[in-house]
Image: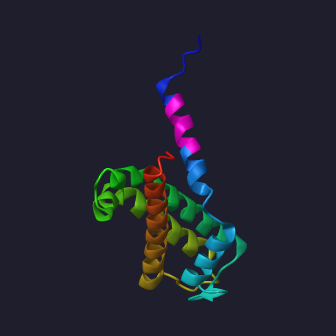
Amino acid sequence: MIIEGFEKRRREQQIKYERRLLRDLSVENMRSRIREFFGPSSFNGIRVSEVLEEGCFDVAIESYLLGGHFSRFGYYGESEDMVRARCQQEETHLIDTLFNFILYWGKIGEQELYNDSLYYRCSVYVEMWWKEGFRTGERSYKLRLH
């Protein structure tokens, strides 16, 4: 008889669930959303390079998985706003991470790039991916795919 630790089993289930959620994501969709939010080639002096694109991919995936993870609360009756309030700290961390990443890797010369509209775009970008993950996760729970 093999006895597994509870944490190991739970982590395996979480990985399995995350893989199922990620099946709905496409690189082209994420790339088009990056261009939609941060412009085709530059935004306020920031060039959208491969490095910036990868950073945006990472934050989009993390935000999507965060929404998917918290979607079980929506399935059990909480409103989307109540669920978002539960993970506000994690969401704020993702927004700050993306904002600082863009400021660091997008800096051109000595130009000061701090801009409220850039922070707002980062906020809306993370929120959009969180909502998409939340809805996908809710659908998964409704179809009993969790």
Give the camera-side residue of 81 and 85.
81
When asked about the image quadrant of residue 40, the answer is bottom right
| Relative vertical location of residue 46 with respect to residue 90 in this rendering, above or below | below
Indicate the quadrant containing the N terminus: top left, top right, bottom left or bottom right: top right
Determine the residue positioned at 40% across, 63% down. 92
Image coordinates of residue 8 in percent, x first then y, are 54, 29
| Relative vertical location of residue 54 with respect to residue 114 in this rendering, above or below | above
Residues rendered magenta in the picture: 8-16
| Relative vertical location of residue 62 with respect to residue 108 in this rendering, above or below | above
Q: Can residue 98 be seen at all in this image of the molecule?
A: yes
112 inside magenta stretch: no
- As drawn, the residue found furthest toward the top would be 1
Determine the residue positioned at 61% across, 63% down. 25
Q: For this view, does 98 lie left or right of residue 93?
A: right
Give the camera-side residue of 71 and 32.
71
Image coordinates of residue 3 in percent, x first then y, are 54, 16
| Relative vertical location of residue 60 with respect to residue 44 in this rendering, above or below | above
Give the camera-side residue of 77 and 69.
77
Give the main secondary structure of the magenta stretch.
Answer: helix
Image coordinates of residue 87 in percent, x first then y, are 36, 56
When asked about the image quadrant of residue 42, the answer is bottom right
- As drawn, the residue found furthest toward the right would be 50
Image coordinates of residue 5 in percent, x first then y, are 51, 22
Determine the residue positioned at 33% across, 63% down. 80
Q: For this view, does 69 lie left or right of residue 52?
A: left
10 inside magenta stretch: yes
